Image (tube, grey):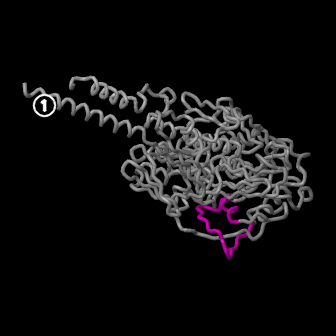
Amino acid sequence: PSSFPLLARMVRDARLLLLLCGLIVLTSEAAAVNVIVIGAGIGGLTAARTLVDNVELPEGTTCEVTVLEARDRIGGRTYTKPAAAFNFGDASGGVLDAGASWIHGSNPEHPTTKMCDALGLERKETIEDDIQLFSSTGTAVADTGASFGSFVEILEDAQWGASDGDSLWQSMAGVTASDGKTRDSEDNQYWLSGLEFNEGGKATTIGAVTVGQRGSEMDGKEEVLPGGYVQLVDALASGQVKVGTGVPQLDVSARNPPPESAKLNILLSREVVAIAKKGELIEVTMKDGEVMQADYVISTLPLGVLKTGTPTFDPPLSVSKTDAIERLAFGNVAKISILFESAWWASKITVDWFGITRSGETARGLSTQYVNMHKVAGKPVLMTFAVGPGDSNPASQSPTSSFSLKEIPQSPTETLRDVRLQMNPTPQTFRRRGGLAAADAVDGMSDAAVWNATLANLKVIFGESVPPSTYKAITVQRWGTDPYARGCYSHHSTTSQGSDYAAMGSDEYGGRLLFAGEATDETFYGSAHNALLTGQRAARAVLRAEEIAPAESLNSGTKQAPGIAAFLLCAATLLTSLFGWSK
């Protein structure tokens, strides 16, 4: 019948149409997947490393990963300062870790410990429970365990009676321990400073109900790296360490030497000022005007930076995330390392930690806690700290005062409460609420002034004539004035909610914009290993969405490899075209 030729042509055209569609799909799936990671700290480097090490692609498909870092170095808030640059001679390594120093809860299954083990890195334990504590008159506290127990009793009673919105400082007022001590007792002020150090905030802004409410704690040792965190940072960047996806657990191995192809593509001095969704792509704009686009963006920007309103987001971030950014607090801790000609304190200090009790918001947090790095790392170095920010959201308020330290007490009979403040001709400006916290004070002090404050406390502990009047070298890391950090680490505030950390870690723009970093999960907030784990989480989200890694490594059901369906469709159509009915 005359209709048969027409039917044959229709069948032929349909097969050709199927062939064309299959080729289009195959070509589409063979296109590159581009990922931009913002930030070359532990979180960003781990995210990029996880992507590069676990991608399995069909032939012709590529996955391009680019890391953008605002600084002229990698590492973020892990920063092992070069010894030579600070005249520290051979006193290098862990004593110069100006940012993250500890592996908290180190054990064989700890992700950071696994990397260290794979790389053969030396670790040293610091024991916090055994501490030598001295009063403001230089008298040794006889029973530090009982002293700490008194503080814990006050803290627990205060939390029991606290309501949402109460600060830790407020809730502890009026509570008396069974030994008669209160919040304002001098040794309890020391322990309070330790809690402020742990949270990165100060008692007047830390939420009483939520303080310390991490989802979990790693069970293990407190360890430092004598060679510095830079060893892990460099290994992640170079590919010396190879990581799995973290599912069901993190697999780590070393590559010596790493192949050139394993090296991450890291672009330094790239400050991101805007992130926008452009169709199915995410556009990233840098301060110098450079624009890049990617299928996915993983942001590891610190909470402190997000609080400033830069970068901008178009469309705006979800209300739950912006509320979380506003409510969660971002702390401030300055880290101080002082190198001496010799370990002159070694005959009196036989433990890893020692300290002096001081009262008052500034005094209790300024050079009162010391790490005996001579015992830990064999170097004549004391590490101390300045703890506490003036405001948890510096972008939200105008500066209320400018100041500098004019005079630091030199006599052991004086206290830091006698420190006088005066206007500085070229001051740093700070926001303060309820008093001046120590870390903010140090942000406005010279290194010499920091040394004088430290020396005053050391003279009380050891005697007027024992500490040397000078040091060999000093380095002070002021994270509060670092424009790419704006502080140290996150914690719950008086207004934050239990869901805020989950909101910080949620994706935006239909899963195209992902977030990682210590402030994006409540489980281990404030730690380097939280940054590592959330970096892996973000990388897995990309691998899963694009189906470019083995399904079993992503803890999901088996899925057909990309491009296979299109290939089978094309093959079937070609065979039909060659041998089919249209001859």
Q: Quadrant of the N terminus?
A: top left
Q: Is residue 45 above or below residue 184?
A: above
Q: Quadrant of the C terminus?
A: top left
The residue at 89%/49% (across/down) is 343
Q: Which residue, given by chain and number where applicable, does mark 1 sit on? A: 6
Q: Is residue 7 above or below residue 403?
A: above
Relative placement, left or right, of 443 versus 461 is: left
Q: Is residue 341 above or below residue 227?
A: below
Mark 1: give few (<14), some (14-19) or many (20+) Cα within 10 Å. Answer: few
In the image, farthest residue toward the front = 583
Between 12 and 423, the one lying in front of the other is 12
Q: Is residue 524 visible?
A: no
Q: Is residue 72 above or below residue 517?
A: below
The residue at 69%/51% (across/down) is 79
Between 39 and 392, the one lying in front of the other is 39
The percent position of residue 229, horizontal first and vertical second, equals 70, 44
Relative placement, left or right, of 36 versus 332 is: left
Between 449 and 552, the one lying in front of the other is 552
The residue at 74%/34% (across/down) is 120
Looking at the rendered structure, the number of numbered marks drawn on it comes to: 1
Kind of residue at disc 1: Leu
Q: Is residue 448 visible?
A: yes
The residue at 54%/50% (across/down) is 38
The percent position of residue 340, horizontal first and vertical second, equals 87, 54
Element on which disc 1 rests: helix
Quarter of the rendering containing residue 556: top left
User: Does the stretch in magenta take in 291?
Assistant: no
Quarter of the rendering containing residue 363: bottom right
Between 158 and 322, the one lying in front of the other is 322
Residue stretch rendered in magenta on the structure: 419-444
Relative placement, left or right, of 114 versus 284 is: right
